[in-house]
Amino acid sequence: MSAAASSSSAPQANNGGIITQPPPPSTLRESRIATHSHIKGLGLADDGTAMDVSQGFIGQNMAREALGLHLSLLKLGKYSGRPLLLVGPPGTGKTALALALSQELGSKVPFCAMVGSEVYSGEVKKTEVLGSCFRRAIGLRIKETKEVYEGEVTELTPSEAENPLSGYGKTISHVIVGLKTVKGTKQLRLDPSVYEAIQKERVVVGDVIYIEANTGAVKRVGRSDTYASEYDLEAEEYVPLPKGDVHKRKELVQDVTLNDLDMANAKPQGGQDIMSVMGQLVKGGRTEVTDKLRKEINKVVDKYIEQGVAELVPGVLFIDEVHMLDMECFTYLNRALESPMSPYVVLASNRGICTIRGTDTDGEGIRSPHGIPIDLLDRCMIIKTSLYTKEEIYKILELRCKVENINITPQALTNLSEQGEKTSLRFVLQLLTPSNILNKTKTGNTSSVDIEDILELNDLFLDAKRSTGLLKDLEDLEKKY
């Protein structure tokens, strides 16, 4: 064992010290979540070059490198309002590239994905749907300092008094809570509403809690570790005794989007009477936010940013099938991209030169590349995706089999990759799970998926090209007779 073995498992660097080899594969089991669940990032080396197989990405090296350069501009904060357009045939990884970009930016950066056809609704205007998606892709990180009382509960005594509304029964007038930390103890006399919150959290003596001074909100952190030896087996989470004083200041960071603020201010709370409640239930649907309200919210956000209370976090808005938008939406996009509060916009289209939607009212509309007006196309940086080769399809199928926990023979993988080159990557990926089910039915999970299972599936399912050929044959037969 030795040094040779250990160096082979580690990422390799070239003479310049730049890592150009992917890290060793994770030993954790990967479970299927979605079509792109195996995508963990763009799979780039430190020098920005695309690795052959890394972070779940295979192929599309030029597109990944271009997107990596775009990502570095995003991280510098110098790319707001300049959209990126991904173009290429169907099934060439345009959506996967956008998801990889969101993975690289991290979970704290908002990522809003939508399809062009989502804007058409009977309840809300098209521009309103686009506007809300823009706002959903802009985050606001609010830093707030709160006064809290934190410690282990040593006393919990509710004080009862006669109910002033009726002579029958008693009501809680206040509650006395004793809290203990490493530094000392404090006894608090709190409002009855806090006692209700304590009951909801199921707090008992010996629990570690904190109470917000302003709102009265109560949070149970866990059981104090001094009680850890009380039982031999217990499903409790034990936490250490809090340090410092009972009364302290805590800095809390909250991440929200501008759309969250819009929705919170747009929906009227209404009264407590039965007619108001019924009116809210019957109305339902989506709420349209006015421009006036958004301007007011923007003023408050600007004020918070100036005071240093909040920080603006521009996210990514991904619009797939962008050719489905019409002229009205493209005009709105042009204006929204010029706004100072604009996210990073990534568009995707699989069309060539086609008619712009909404311009064909007189029978012949305006034709443009990718179905996008020239003035918006001029703003875009365009990245092209290309069809996968047979070798790349083989590697992708191998990766998906690992993700879906499917045992398959190399001969079956070779047959599928050849089919994928002739038909499409999506078609052969869809055959993986049925082939595994078919194999289990025949052999009882004792062997791997082989070429016979794949050939049997080909008799059961047609790809798009074979289906089209059959329809043409039927059409010719009908003409003949």
Image (cartoon, rainbow, N blue to C red):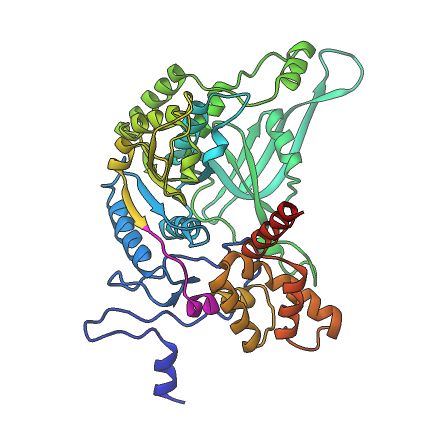
Tell me if 174 is positioned left or right of 23 in this view: right
Residue sitting at 48 percent across and 63 percent down?
A: 422
Q: In the rendered structure, does residue 346 fall within the stretch colored magenta?
A: no
Decide which of 259, 223 is in the foreground and name it: 259
Tell me where residue 458 appears, x and y as whole percent. Answer: 63, 64
Q: Is residue 219 above or below residue 446?
A: above
Tell me where residue 261 appears, x and y as whole percent. Answer: 44, 26
Report the label total. Answer: 0
Which residue sits furthest front?
A: 481
Tell me, yes or no, if residue 55 can be seen here: no
Question: Where, quadrant-wise, is the N terminus in this rendering?
Answer: bottom left
Tell me if 87 is positioned left or right of 465 in this view: left
Which residue sits furthest left?
A: 16
Q: Which residues are magenta?
A: 384-395
Q: Is residue 259 above or below residue 3?
A: above
Decide which of 8, 307 is in the foreground and name it: 8
Residue sitting at 64 percent across and 50 percent down?
A: 477
Tell me if 168 is positioned left or right of 434 in this view: right
